[in-house]
Image (cartoon, rainbow, N blue to C red):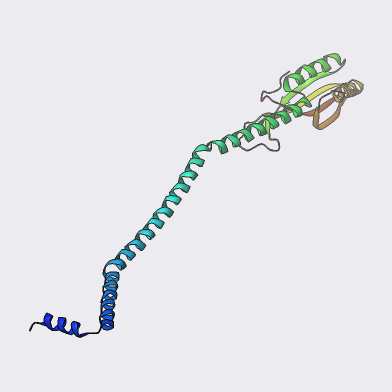
Amino acid sequence: MSQWQLLSDRFSQLQRREKSLLFFGSLLLLLWLSVIYVLEPLWHQTKQTRALQLKTSQQLQGAEQQAEVLLAQLSTDLNQDYRERISNLEQQQQQLNERIRQSASYFIGAEQMVTLLRNILQSSKGVQVKSLLTSVPKAVRLQGQQPDDPVMLFQHTTTLVIGGGYTDLFRALQRMEQLPWLLNWSALDYQVVEYPQAELTLTLITVSEYEDFIRL
């Protein structure tokens, strides 16, 4: 008798309840095997797919954010900082030019000084020009100017020696002091040559926009 026939006879001898238990037990076994060999691999595959989908979604979101940043940078004027710096420098230059213009208006220029001295000395009777010496002009730097900025003002130092009587020299000096400009002198020397004749030495300081020497 075959093995299958023996199993069939034994199954036939079982009670109905036992047959039902055996049937459902076999069915549960098949379901469990299907879970292990079919559903579980599918579940793991689904889990991996979802994880990959989440990772891809995060990468896509990051790429979109980077794209937004790049678009924002492209929409911004890359030269804006440089333009603002240039604008600020231009404003500073304008302010500096205005300060120089205002400062220079209080001083007598080189050409004005030449004409002015001629008029004063020519109209001052008894006064003669003995000598006029000029030194090398010096650059004047205002507050706020940078070392590499162009020089816009020059200081001129002139040594003027005039001769005449005391009264004539005093009147000429008074006329210079009454000028509307700032005509400064750093030194003043009065010497009697032969009474009543004397010599007055003035070291005058003027500021001008020009570097040219003063010549009478």
Residue at the far left in the pictured view: 1
Q: Which residue is more in the foreground, 142 or 65?
A: 65
Q: Which residue is more in the foreground, 189 or 153?
A: 153
In the image, residue 171 above or below residue 31:
above
Say if residue 158 shows up in the picture: no
Count the marks: how many?
A: 0
Occupied quadrant, residue 145? top right
In the image, residue 170 above or below residue 18:
above
Residue appearing at x 47%, y 43% in the figure: 70
Residue appearing at x 51%, y 41% in the figure: 72
**Residue 116 percent across, percent down from the top left:** 79, 18
**Residue 185 percent across, percent down from the top left:** 80, 30
Q: Which residue is more in the foreground, 14 or 71?
A: 14
Say if residue 32 shows up in the picture: yes
Q: Which residue is more in the foreground, 161 or 210?
A: 210
Residue 50 shown left or right of residue 112 in the figure: left
In the image, residue 186 above or below residue 125:
below
